[in-house]
Image (cartoon, rainbow, N blue to C red):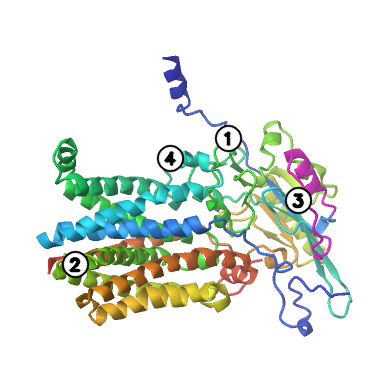
Amino acid sequence: MAEQMTGSGDEDAETGPPKRGYYGLPVLKVPVWRWEVWCYFFLGGLAAGSFVVASLARLCGDERDRVVSRAGYLISFAAVLGCPPLLIKDLGRPGRFLNMLRVFKPESPMSMGVWGLLGFSACSSLAAFREVFAASRGPSGALARLVPARVVAVLGTGLGVFLGGYTGVLLSVTSVPLWSRSRLLGPTFLASAFSAGVSAVSLALSVNGKTPRSSLHKLERIKLAALVAESAVLAGYLRSTDRAAQPLVVREQYGRQFVLGAVGLGLAVPAIAAVAGAAHHRRSTALASLCALIGGLLLRYAIVEGGRLSAEDPETTFWHTALPDGKTDR
Amino acid sequence: MSLLNELLQSLEKVDPPAPQSAKGFFTDATVCIGCKACEVACKEWNQLPAEPLRWTGNSYDNTEALSSTTWRHVLFVEQIPESRLSPRWLLLSDVCKHCANAPCLEVCPTGAIIRTEFDTVYVQQDVCNGCGYCVAACPFGVIERNPDDGGAHKCTLCYDRLKDGQQPACAKVCPTQSIQFGNLDELRGRAERRVADLHARGETDAYLYGHDERVLEGGLHAFFLLTDRPETYNLPTHPRRPVKNAVPGYLGTLAMAAGLLLAGALSFRR
């Protein structure tokens, strides 16, 4: 007959270290969020990042940088279009998605996110509408020229910063150790959103031979800054997540997607390319930008899917919820 | 005109029911005999479907965990030392804790999860849209999204029975008073006296889990008397409050935004 040794059994030191937990069953429920959520996190970040870059070009750049703001606003609009369908598809009862709008609840990052996305979509749509129709004749052109470009740029930048970062805050406001041990997931996702946005704009412009070289150089500089910031905050996130970060580094879990994909392809390759002066070669710029985009998607993939493994592991949960000094709180 | 009135009527705020005294559960593991009458009574009263039977091999526990269709779960812990001398059985009927600071309620983006007039935590099924945030937020793995109807479900503390002045089905049916229902302050006093009594009789391992504000900064309205570490009953010793991460997370995001915007603005200006 098999000997079941569950519980602490402190008095039985001869049977090895006391086993914690209950038949190894998870303490937490496995999160229900799947591909819709990491795809949305990526698209929302991309929409936010490209909008912010476009607005910076519009507000701080010169006349030649207008191509940057045009590409950024159009990419942002295209990306933001994909967000609502993913968010609705993700629900258990998709027909009730409008219930999200019956409350405004600051303590719930998801509630704030819905309102933030709503406001951001309005700015993104207005900016894209102006870009497309401002030069045309007729009523649509007149209407597009009525859009206050600078107001929309400033307002959308504020909302875009929120949209890029809140998804990380949303994950950290849970009980899943991989997501909630560290409080740095918000800034991590924002930096990644920014680098994805710059990369998408730079990819679009580098395949277009008419883009002024000066604009591409400026984009490369911003991209490098975003990549450095992202690397630093990601390192801080991993450090403070400590042993709960296991799903991101173990090869059999999401180690390959995270280490090779998000860090190698998404951070190292584009950073090296930017330092090596890829801005002089349009094809290298395009390739490095593509790598950064794929890396940004894999970052969210590994973290969202890794959360499921984190929740399934009772030992990590016990470690995460232990008292600081190892007391038992009786 | 009448159609407009009808539409406007649905927007009118209805006054919530008058607050009652806070109700809760005191579940005493030392008198549980593992009969699972609570599991059955809960399923019957709440018309919850049975799960397909699966032999787990984990003692007499073929239920394994609370779920969207199991709102009471009896744990069976066999502690048999190598010497096989003085073996110990730990039994406990687990349930939703109806936390004073309930993470599921705090993160719910639709307002579907509410605090009732009895100070219990309740999911309004006609509002829940199945976003799944509560599932990831609950530190006890209680609430779950049901794949059949897509909504989040958990113990209601028999809200319908409470409204009629009845006690919850599990407490009513418990043959050993391991599950006690009542006014929270009364239950807490009773539980403390029970621990003192057990200590006097030599069961010095007995202690209360969740009766004061140490767990989740406000305590649990369904608390437990245990005789081993919380982990033995698959309970976290010191669960953290998820919402505590929100403000630091936003502040970090803001700092990152300031740095990136500055770098971006400088790059374009030059």
Residue at the far bottom: name it.
A14
- Hey, what amino acid is under mark 1? Pro
> Can residue A108 be seen?
no
Q: State which chain disc 2 sits on.
A: A
Question: Which quadrant holds residue A1?
Answer: bottom right
Q: Mark 4 vs mark 1: same chain?
A: no
Q: Residue B256: percent from the left, percent from the top? A: 31, 66
Rendering quarter of residue B1: top left
Q: Quadrant of the C terminus of chain B?
A: bottom left
**Residue visible at 82% across and 55% down?**
B32
Give left or right: position of B41 versus B238: right
Q: Please report the bounds of the magenta region as a residue range.
A: B35-60
**Residue A89 appears at what percent x and percent y?**
50, 48
Of badges 3 and 1, the one in the foreground is 3
Which mark's residue is nearer the viewer, 2 or 3?
2
Label 1 crowd bin: few (<14), some (14–19), many (20+), radius 10 Å: few
What's the residue at 53%, 64% (across, down)?
A305
Q: Is residue B115 left or right of residue A207?
A: right
Which residue matches tag 1?
B19
Mark 3 and 4 residues: CB-CB less than 8 Å, in contact? no
Residue indicated by mark 2: A209
Q: What's the residue at 40%, 63% (across, down)? A: A186
Q: Alpha carbon of mark 3 to alpha carbon of mark 4: how far?
A: 35 Å
Residue B232 placement (x, y as % from top left): 72, 67
Name the residue tied to disc 3. Answer: B51
Task: Give the residue pinned by disc 4.
Answer: A101
Which label belongs to residue A234?
A: none
